[in-house]
Amino acid sequence: MNIKKNLFLLGLLLASAPVVTPVAAPAAARRFALQADTLFAFGKWSERDLSAAGRARLQQVAGELLAAAEGIRDVQVSGYADRIGDASANLRLSQRRAETVRNVLVGYGLPAMGITALGRGESVSVTECSDSLPRPALVACLAPDRRVEIVARPAA
């Protein structure tokens, strides 16, 4: 009888236990980092300055974003520059590059309203290069700072 009573109590306990519903982890943002030197010639920013390789890479990114469009809330395109030259000129250059990339993505079918372009200038450096390097070596060393990043944030 003790076993039946214990089984009965166990059944009551299990029946009154809270139901745990698994929650899917939030989707991660999709990130694309594009070297500006692959997209544009040094110091250039316009759509006519885009290289064939850069245009092909942007078409690939646009295709990936279009395929995942249902799960994307918005897209932010951020342009970055190296520290060579004037800071305000670098900010304008990075903004123009971000806008060009945004316009190209829109041209490939992404909705314009969902994409913002932001120039960050030389504010977020990813390199450590000595200013004592000869100019060609400094330009090469700072190449990773010249980039465009595309971040597609997931829908809530």
Image (cartoon, rainbow, N blue to C red):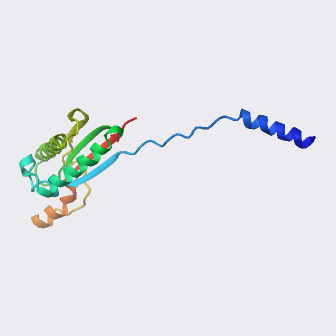
Q: Is residue 147 visible?
A: no
Kindly identify the residue that appears in the image at 80 percent across and 39 percent down.
10
Quadrant for residue 20, please give it. Answer: top right
Kindly identify the residue that appears in the image at 28 percent across and 51 percent down.
32
Kindly identify the residue that appears in the image at 22 percent across and 35 percent down.
111
- Between residue 141 and residue 51, name the one nearer to us: 51
Q: In the picture provided, is 140 more to the left or to the right than 27?
A: left
The spot of residue 88 in percent (x, y) is: 12, 43
In the image, residue 8 sits, relative to residue 137, either above or below, namely above
Q: Is residue 109 visible?
A: yes
Q: Quadrant of the C terminus?
A: top left
- Between residue 86 and residue 112, name the one nearer to us: 112
The spot of residue 14 in percent (x, y) is: 74, 38
In the image, residue 106 sits, relative to residue 64, either above or below, namely above
Kindly identify the residue that appears in the image at 70 percent across and 35 percent down.
17
Q: How many marks?
A: 0
The spot of residue 82 in percent (x, y) is: 17, 54
As drawn, which residue projects farthest toward the left? 48
The spot of residue 141 in percent (x, y) is: 19, 63
Q: Quadrant of the N terminus?
A: top right
Quadrant for residue 151, please give it. Answer: top left
Quadrant for residue 42, please give it. Answer: bottom left
